[in-house]
Amino acid sequence: MLACSVHRLVTYIFVYEDLISLTCGAIVIWYFAGSFEKNVGTVKHCFFTIVFAVLAGLLYFLLETVVSRVSEVEDAKGFMPVAFATLSVSTTRSRMKRALFFGFRVPVVLVPWFLLFVAWFIPHSSLLSNLCGLLVGKACILSEYVALNQCRIIAS
């Protein structure tokens, strides 16, 4: 059964339950994923979409068993986890120090965390899967910095 469900690690990003969650997903794709595509290019964007979907799905699968014992957990669905991963990568790489968020100037690296709180109120949005997406993006940036530092150590 597990081998037959492997496709779900990518296809869950295309599942929406109602028109409101589909509209929110479309806005997220248009606003956040579009700017990420402009920064990295179309081919890398497609690659990162698949990688972020799979990694966020695997992390969700691992954490869901633990969290579901404590509280009820929504199923992972929609593009939001991938959008949070791309937003996390974009804000960490950004040269901007501060961003305007609902009229307040906040450090740009905190914007994904504030948006995670806002996304909590979107109907049929899974807080755990969005958190997994955000953590996958942070892990991607962290692994990039570690790889760069190792290359610098080897080169010197």
Image (cartoon, rainbow, N blue to C red):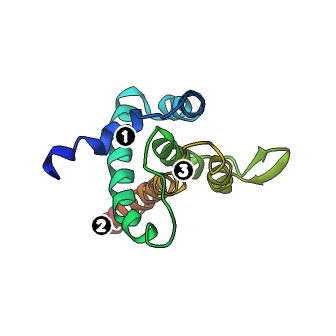
Sequence-wise first label, 3 or 1: 1
- Is tag 3's residue or tag 2's residue first in the polypeptide sequence? 3
In 3D space, how far apart are the residues under numbered discs 1 and 2 (Cα atoms)?
A: 40 Å
Is residue 5 toward the left or the right of residue 104 in the image?
Answer: left
Above/below status of 27 relative to 53: above
Q: Which residue is mark 3?
A: 88
**Element type at mark 1:** helix
Q: Is residue 101 above or below residue 22?
A: below
Disc ID at residue 12: 1
Q: Identity of the amino acid at label 2? A: Ile
Residue 74 percent across, percent down from the top left: 48, 53
Q: Amino acid at mark 1?
A: Tyr
* Mark carried by residue 101: none
Q: Are marks 3 and 2 in contact (CB under 8 Å)?
A: no
Q: Residue at x 45, y 43 (%)?
A: 82
Within 10 angstroms of label 2, few (less than 14), some, or many (20 or more) residues? few
**Dot in front, 3 or 2:** 3
Residue 154 bears which disc, if any?
2
* Residue 5 x %, y %: 21, 46
Which residue reaches farthest right? 103
